[in-house]
Amino acid sequence: MIRTFLESFLASEKKKNLFFVFLGVVILLVSKNYGMFDDDILFGTRMGNQLYDNSIFNWTMPDSFDPGHPPFLGFVLAVFWKLFGHYLWVSHLAMLPFTIGFFYQLHKFIGYFIKDKVLQFLAFLLIIIDPTLSTCFVLVNMEIISLFFFFLVINALFFNKTSLKFIGLFFLSIVSYRSMMLFAGIFLFDILNRFLFKKEKLKSIITFKFLFFYAVTSLPAFLFVGWRLFTKGWLQTHPESPWTSLWHFADFNYFIRNLIVLVWRYLDFGRIFIMLFIVISFFVFGKKIVQSKKNKQLILLSISAVIFIILTIISVTNSVGIRYFIVSYICFNLFAFLILNEFYTSKKVIYTLLFIGLVSGNLWIYPKTLSQGWRATLGHVPYHSLRLKAIDYLNSEKINVENVGSFFPNYTTLDLIDFSGDQRSFAEFNGKNNYVFYASVYNLTDEELNILENKYTILKQFNNFNITIIIYIIKKT
């Protein structure tokens, strides 16, 4: 009966699109009060405010917080702020078109591999509940923008829509440096897909027309990079940049460390169940799994799309971000679903286990001494309301937040996070602050944890589900 209803509902293109709109609006209503978080403060509010307060077309950022990336997210936010007002909920509203567009493109992408309407929907659900992907829906971030344009291009490539391919590539090339690398990954996939699966010769693939198409669509990226080098003389970091220490070539030990972390990213937050299922399936069914052309295409896309991001990130001392590889996670989740549907009889049981496994990823919490990618899991969500509650406590106790030490990403102007208009900011923790604002979503060094334990005592503690915020006061000697 449920299948009959779904078949009837999904058969209507209008109803399906309305569902994507409804889902996007529900997410907006749930998350509209979630403050800016982590790097999104920089790429969203700080860069967005710079454009909003000056000119939305003047992309020159002050050196003090210029990360080198195109301020595309800030540009989108500034446009929406100009239209609807400078509010937090408007920032989330600005993400709504990209979220709905992504849902549509993701479903179309799945439709290339699966023809059954109900199975398409089940695959869609298995993909969007990935903790790292689903977190992109509730935060103001540039990943959801990149994901929309990425899958717009891939679908245009699969369904031979040249104009949509042009539009998608054109914008993908200017969202961020990572989106530029996704652009390069698509270029590689396009060549390999035609060579390996369409059996075209390289000479007939890499033609002037082919290269000219990609050259024109990459113009925004080249113009931005050229403009930056001409006007600033540096691309991403400068000697006084707060991020200069992150962009050095990794030595052998750090390279190995990066490889280990990279594997961890693919297993983190419940994805280990997907990857184990795929590995076990290869042991059981062997080459049968890759006899399908579409299965091989999916594997190729999962690797080629992010290969330039991987090569870059394992070669430098910057952290291996969990959100960098979302397109690859999506491909592997879909690949697992294709294997399940084609080779297994206990489909419902295995699907349920994989689904629950992914959902459980939002509950994964590591010890304080291990760094955790909180912005890549819904597990951080209680922090937003808890943070406001803790700030209210400080205000009621007449403790000025400017005299309270805190940690990244909280030692910034309050207004940059919650659009409250409050220009006060927490001080950066130095071990001598009289008060300290700590939350379990902050990644602290062992030294900082030891200082908190030995030099401070708990003044007030706030708990919400799996998140804790503690107001410390320094011990009297």
Image (tube, grey):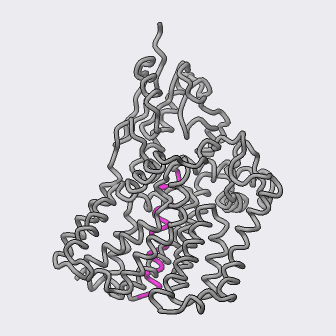
Classify 407 as above or below 238: above
Can you give x and y, in whole percent of width and height, for residue 289 in the image? 28, 80
Residue farthest to the top, as pictured: 477
Residue farthest to the front, as pictured: 252
User: For this view, does 7 lie left or right of residue 457?
Assistant: left
Can you give x and y, in whole percent of width and height, for residue 113 in the image? 39, 84
Residue 37 visible in rendering: no
The quadrant in which residue 276 appears is: bottom left
For the point 27% across and 86% down, the residue is 4
User: Which of 188/453 is in front?
Assistant: 188
User: Which of 435/330 is in front?
Assistant: 330
The secondary structure that most of the magenta stretch takes on is helix
For the point 52% across and 32% down, the residue is 392
The N terminus is located in which quarter? bottom left
User: Which of 65/359 is in front?
Assistant: 65
State which region is magenta: 12-33
For the point 31% across and 86% down, the residue is 291
Classify 50 as above or below 28: above
**Tally of marks:** 0
Can you give x and y, in whole percent of width and height, for residue 48 in the image? 69, 53
Residue farthest to the left, as pictured: 346
User: Which of 341/124 is in front?
Assistant: 341
Q: Is residue 29 magenta?
A: yes
Classify 124 as above or below 206: above
Can you give x and y, in whole percent of width and height, for residue 202 in the image? 56, 88
User: For this view, does 453 lie left or right of residue 279?
Assistant: right
